[in-house]
Image: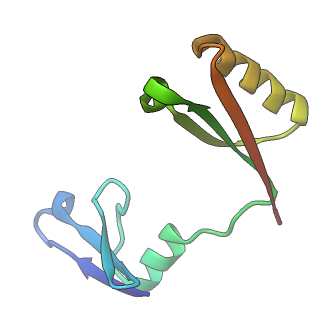
Amino acid sequence: MKIAIENHKYAPELNKVYLNHSGKWYKYTAQETAGIKSIRQAREQLFKPVKPGKIATVTIEYSGHLAWKATQYIGRFKTYSELRRFINNRKVYHTLHERVQVKIDLIG
């Protein structure tokens, strides 16, 4: 992975950090990269260590003419009851003709 920094001395709001991953460039703007002046600082700020925990991906899928309403939620949770409450709250906003799929990843 390559990192390139575009640094403006008199206009810091124009500073950008570019990451090249597998031949594709990703741009991070000044709000995400405030105060970065070196490659080492960019690595420390953009690649922070991952905290252990549980991450859930909740996918709500529809079939037929309602396929455009498909939604995906990704987030951390502490207990499985918290995840269950979240899924029940999402079901309130969706119709009865959906399929809910939950994928849980344990990190750390």
- In x, y percent, where is residue 9? 14, 72
Residue 73 screen position, x and y as percent: 60, 38
Q: Position of residue 53 (x, y in %)?
A: 81, 54
Residue 41 is situated, as x and y percent measured from the top left of the image, at 45, 77
Residue sitting nearer the eye, 53 or 48: 53
Total marks in image: 0
Classify residue 62 as left or right of residue 105: left
The C terminus: image quadrant: bottom right
Where residue 94 sits, quadrant-wise, is: top right
Q: Is residue 77 left or right of residue 2?
A: right
Q: At 44% from the left edge and 87% from the top edge, which residue is drawn?
A: 1
Q: Residue at x 58, y 13 (%)?
A: 93
Residue drawn at x 49%, y 69% is: 46
Q: Residue drawn 70% across and 32% down?
A: 100
Residue occupying the far left of the picture: 10
* Left or right placement of residue 39 versus residue 47 in this view: left
The chosen color scheme is: rainbow
Measured along the vertical axis of the image, is residue 86 above or below residue 57?
above
**Hey, which quadrant is residue 59 in on the image?**
top right
**15 or 91, nearer to the observer:** 91
Residue in the foreground of this view, choosing between 68 and 30: 68
Check the image and report above or below for 106 versus 92.
below
Work out whether 36 lies above or below 67: below
Farthest residue toward the bottom? Answer: 2
